[in-house]
Image: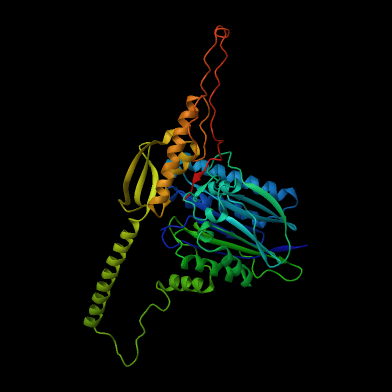
Amino acid sequence: MPIAFNYAARSDVGMVRTNNEDSGYAGPHLLAMADGMGGHAGGDVASSTIIGALADLDDQAFSGAEATDALLARIALANAQLGDRVKEDPSLRGMGTTLIALLRSRDKLVLTHIGDSRAFLVRDGVVTQITKDHSFVQNLVDEGRITVEEAQTHPQRSLVTKVLTGQPDDDPDVVVRQAIPGDRYLIASDGLTDYVARDTIDEVLLGERKPVDACERLVALALRAGAPDNVTVVIGDVVDLRVGPVPTDVPTVVGAAAATRKGTRPIPVTPAEKAAALTKEATGSDAGSEDVELAEEGPPTRRGRALRILGALAVAVIVLAGGLYAGWLWTQSQYWVGVDQNRVVLNRGIDQHLGPVWLSRVERRTDIAATDLPDIYRVRLAGGVEFDNRADADALLRSLAVQARACEWFRDQLQTCRSVTDDWTQPTPSPSPSPSPSDSASPGPSPSASPTTSPTTAPIPST
């Protein structure tokens, strides 16, 4: 059966961030979304590199295992490129990205997933999440230590256990699904799923007939909820081409992958945006932005024009000053954890700068050495871990203190440093019994210490 996607994709920088680290792609045979992390360390570089490497798979025809092999090979190649970029530019150390990709192969779909972005399937009026987060709180849910509801507000909900970081052992999950006409797929960054309730997402997916309308409504709902993170959604409806062609076969690229340079917003995607962009390019101004002169008004005088300009400048200065002050007040309610001179530090403010001025300062310098932490923690801390309140930041510092003590103990036992649960305590060796006269000549070996808790998968702090 010949099938394809009727698709749409939308991305927004969100209510707080200054650049979009998400990247999305939607085409007739490929849907993909990557949520970059690393802040100034290059999350936008990571996500756009991965999506850019996958894009041309949309133009190829695969059968059977070819699609799976091609998708995994392309991801591995792109991930290696991330590693090369870090070697060339040390300032990118700590960058990484999640990834969800759906590649059509005849009547099958190859789904690959790594990180805490999510994919959903709508079939027969039922919405199902078809990916499981690679995150610390998901591990706690799987172990029965917390409920799904508790995971939504857990102070370490931003910690992921697997992402693409340029390391050769970054291994995404892969499954093959049957493509059934009428199915709808949504893949989204946590800028949507963290701030819009699941039942609301389900309602939009079931209620909106067109993918583009569903995308735009979901992004709008996330922004209305005050989402501080980037928001990216990609939707594809499975269509039987024997019934009718898809409305378009021109791919849609959004987010960092659509930017012409770092920091630019996504390319125009709606007809109105495209028309406005063409008008601006042709005339050098926005359509409708020029004053309309009525015949009875006559030409404006030079003095009147000068007064209007001065008045507009005065209003602009007042608005700008008020906005800057409000923005500064907001930054003082934010925190991020990073590394300075090999020590873990808590910073107040945001991990950004305006020219030479950084918008944060060190609030607390801990005794935790970055070199005493598992490698996976050090990589993510290099990019900074952001929080919107002090309590969550302090919770991470307590967790890092436990990890550092555990690493020190493991090394003393000549074992490899590894991650442990937050309730880990240093094991106490069992006391040896007092030797009796009969066995003092040949004492047995003393029991060796062992950890009281089993290690969990090492969590990676995510932005």
Q: Residue at x 55, y 10 (%)?
A: 436
Q: Residue at x 43, y 33 (%)?
A: 371
Q: Is residue 22 left or right of residue 384?
A: right
| The furthest residue to the right | 1
When the figure is inspected, residue 84 is found, relative to residue 106, above or below; the finding is above
Count of numbered circles in the view? 0
Q: Is residue 252 left or right of residue 21?
A: right
- Expressed as whole percent of the image width and height from the top left, the position of residue 456 reads 56, 39
Its colouring scheme is rainbow
Camera-side residue: 187 or 194?
Answer: 194
Q: Residue at x 60, y 47 (%)?
A: 142
Q: Quadrant of residue 378?
A: top left
- Expressed as whole percent of the image width and height from the top left, the position of residue 375 reads 49, 36
When the figure is inspected, residue 206 is found, relative to residue 88, above or below; the finding is below
Camera-side residue: 400 or 305?
Answer: 400
Camera-side residue: 312 or 368?
Answer: 368
| The furthest residue to the bottom | 296
Asked whether residue 382 appears in the rendered view, the answer is no
Asked whether residue 301 appears in the rendered view, the answer is yes
- Expressed as whole percent of the image width and height from the top left, the position of residue 242 reads 77, 68
- Expressed as whole percent of the image width and height from the top left, the position of residue 60 reads 68, 55
Can you say which quadrant of the picture contains the N terminus? bottom right
